[in-house]
Amino acid sequence: MIYEGKAITVKPVENGVAELNFDLQGESVNKFNELTLSELKDAVAALKADNSVKGLIVTSAKDVFIVGADITEFLSNFSKPEEELVQGNLAANEIFSAFEDLEFPTVAAINGIALGGGFEMCLAADYRVISSSATVGLPEVKLGIYPGFGGTVRLPRLIGTDNAIEWIASGKEQRPDAALKVGAVDAVVAPEQLRDSALALIQRCLNGELDYKAKRLPKLEKLKLNPIESMMAFESAKGFIAGQAGPHYPAPVEAVKTIQKAAGMGRDKALEVEAKGFAKLAKTDVASSLIGLFLNDQVLKKKAKQYEKQSAKVERAAVLGAGIMGGGIAYQSALKGTPILMKDIAQAGIDLGLSEASKLLVKQLGRKRITPEKMATVLNNIVPTMNYGDFNTVDVVVEAVVENVNVKKAVLAECEEHIGEDKFLTSNTSTISINELAKALKRPENFCGMHFFNPVHMMPLVEVIRGEKTSDETIATVVNYAKKMGKTPVVVNDCPGFMVNRVLFPYFGGFGGLMRDGADFQQVDKVMERFGWPMGPAYLMDVVGIDTGQHAESVMAEGFPERMARDFKSVGDVLFENKRYGQKTSAGFYKYEADKSGKPKKVVDEATYELLKPVCAERVEFSEEEIIARMMIPLCLETVRCLEDNIVESAADADMALIMGIGFPPFRGGALKYIDSMGVAEFCALADKYAHLGALYHPTEGLREMAAAGKTFFGN
């Protein structure tokens, strides 16, 4: 044994060839944490000192190669002073460079996922052999940073500037064939041939067939670009990437700037440029938010795994009510492998549901994301019916009929008679109390809410709503079904609007107050879109449907009269009275016309202003800061209340639900992270500035106590 640690071992194999093997003890995956980096340093030193080693293969004992750096260490490391971060990165890069500079050929045998630091380890090797089932990539921009272990230096020198910029700025995982095409790997082999192929490649180097020093040399030198090529490559890339990434995500453009700045430098100087730029990005709020989201997502996945252990089997499902929503649910279930019955009381509904599923499959086929065979399988897994004949074969039923409490109660009670006593009923209601609906059932313990967001195939969130009598097995089974459908389930307790809609309507309440006081809805939309929302509140209300919004608002007002009941006629009331329901009627705040592809395109309708005049004050020009404050304070405070009222289990659950359910700007991390970023005391002071607007703007006592104690939602 040349070296033995808790994450890395190095041992002789044959004919002077050694094997450096990653196998981080106590973990299911390999990752670069402080331990692994420290051991890699010692392992490289041991290899350097061992004159018997003539070549080295790098392998993994796990199903993955190395998933990257240990992100759980990021937030604590990133809180260090910038200069300390730079020095830390340079110290890590000294280890990778020492590995790269070993006096014998090295081959990385990539058996599974090699991302971020894991792939940067591979780049430091002379050659890379990859299993046909593996993937590689540098996804750091998704965390608001860019590669920090030499990725911006080695990759462009290995595969060319344009390819490297595309890989790094997109952050996408790359399949073996794509990696081979650009030269990021040297061979793709079957999984069972990987180790032998790596050893054979080393042998070819030792036999003089391959010149590993010549292969290594470009990674140590300047980028081979003349001034004109350099200008064309970098300047055009920066403009394009800035347009793609948008103003709130600086990392992709900064990565290009870093590659450009270091283009005329050798490896070591280029690594210094990378380290300085990396440290600057690591100190940004965007990085803090996106890393926090990644960690929150890991927490949700861990919870879902725990629920999976308690779940009953889900081999066949059913949806009650076809139409757009039912068709979307049926499509998603069948696409992800759970066959589903789709029941409606009318053939027209069945036809609409099947049409919706077919339309979505045709799109997938057109984009070459599925094969014709897969499309046929999915369609065959959606079984339309107008009776309950086969419902004794299903494990979970999703009710998706009209949003009317009496209709839903009747349908649920009827369905309960046709399913097994140990099977599960859910309601895809967006507003109606699960406890109220459960009153119609003989087995309320087998019932919960399963709130999908529209469009079902695109929105990742499913709210799983626990009623007072819902059993743990029901929740676990429905969470498991949602996960099987490719969704991210968040478990919440019953209340009007549940978690997401309860939080969304105070946001709309802030918008209604702004309009009452003379704001221009177009200005408000533009400000909130610049803030980071995918669409402004007026446009969002049009997309949701003014009629749908009015119904939901009445539920919220009844449930939370102190905050959500209005004492004035709103712009929504006026549009509703005039049957301007938004996109569905081609007119709401905006008019909607079909674009070239047939999709509704919003256009300004001056008639809207005349229509709304009676309920709006004379036009006032609000500052951007005031618009943001009046919109965001109610949303954030209602999120706080949901956490305090135990509607949602944790701050992480709350923020993830808002990002996945209503498009809260990810780079801001969620409502509670947004409060943390501002400072809890500062947020309370800002809310107090608008306290005269009503209870929506009044901080809770719990939040004031947090402010006084210097506490945050994430961190302490």
Image (tube, helix red, strand yellow):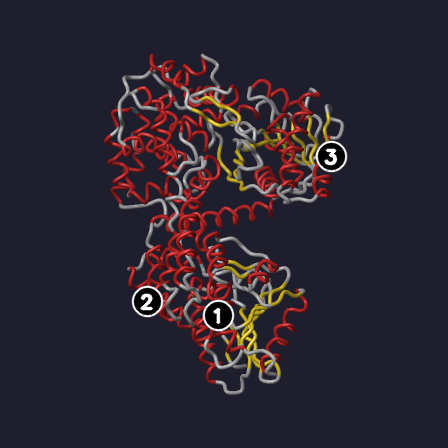
**Cα separation between marks 1 and 2:** 20 Å
Tag shown at residue 124: 1
Residue at image location 27% in from the left, 46% down from the top: 710
Going from N to C along the chain, the mark reached first, 2 or 3, is 2
Give the foreground label among 1 and 2. Answer: 1
Residue at point 36% right, 44% down? 713
Q: How many marks?
A: 3
Residue extending furthest toward the front: 228
Which amino acid is tagged 1? Ala
Q: Is residue 278 above or below residue 411?
A: below
Q: Residues within 10 Å of mark 1 (few under 14, many from 20)?
A: many
Determine crowd level at label 2: few under 14, some 14-19, many 20+ residues with C-alpha closer than 10 A: some
- Give percent across and percent down for residue 15: 61, 85
Callout 1: helix, strand or loop? helix
Can you give x and y, in whole percent of width and height, for residue 189 in the image?
65, 66
Q: State the CA–CA distance, disc 3 to disc 1.
A: 56 Å
- Kind of residue sitting beneath label 3: Thr
- At mark 2, the secondary structure is helix
Q: Which residue is mark 3?
A: 393
The amino acid type of the residue labelled 2 equals: Gln
Q: Picture quarter containing residue 362?
A: top right
Percent x, y of residue 535:
43, 32
* Residue matched to label 2: 87
Spatial separation of the CA atoms under disc 2 and disc 3: 62 Å
Q: Residues within 10 Å of mark 3 (few under 14, many from 20)?
A: some
Q: Nearer the viewer, mark 2 or mark 3?
A: 2
Quarter containing the N terminus: bottom right
